[in-house]
Image (tube, rainbow, N blue to C red):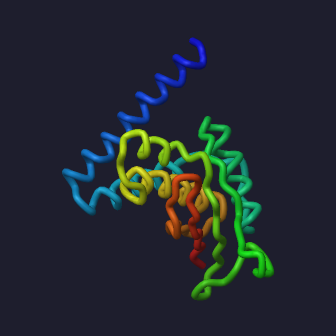
Amino acid sequence: MGPAETRDELQGLLVVMGSLSHGLEQVLGRGAESVTFRAGRTVGLKSSVSRQEPEILAALAVVSEELRAKGIIWPFEAWKPAAAPGFVYEKDGKQAVKLVFRNCMVRCSLFRYGHEQKQSLCMMNHGLFCGYVQKITGKRAELEILHAGENACLKELVLQG
């Protein structure tokens, strides 16, 4: 199979993913986000990981390795404003870090289908990511979308406890 056929197959899959998430949202309404987040988190929590890592930035490197080992290429990096002293900061007594996600398959799926971001398909990915972070750090993780854009999304990861 050549590059053109592979691209066509991928684009077809992207449309199917977008239409499935749209249909789920039509049936379940706002509950679709909770269902898909929980499903993604469960997959992440049940996955085997190569090692535990309590420090947040080191844990993110492990998350990236684990996802890549499973064939999930979802590039992300820690981000901070130029004036900030470091990537990790405290938020309401919890550790937090801002992350930039680029080249996201979910974002591509939603654009290809013509559907909004920040809904059930995004929440499934967030759940998966949080499940892996929790499995690796031992701390419950929450991921919030601060900005969803065409070229990248900015999110905030907060670790409980």
Foreground pick, 14 / 4 = 4
The C terminus appears in which quarter of the rendering?
bottom right
Asked where in the image residue 2 lies, by quadrant, the reply is top right
Q: Is residue 3 left or right of residue 22?
A: right
Q: Residue furthest right?
A: 85
Q: Is residue 27 left or right of residue 9?
A: left
Q: Residue at x 42, y 55 (%)?
A: 117
Foreground pick, 72 / 81 = 81
Residue 61 pos. (x, y %): 74, 55
Asked where in the image residue 99 lies, by quadrant, the reply is bottom right
Q: Residue at x 70, y 67 (%)?
A: 79
Please say if 7 is above or below 85.
above
Please say if 102 is above or below 158.
above
Residue 108 pos. (x, y %): 49, 43
Q: Residue at x 52, y 70 (%)?
A: 146
Q: Residue at x 76, y 80 (%)?
A: 84
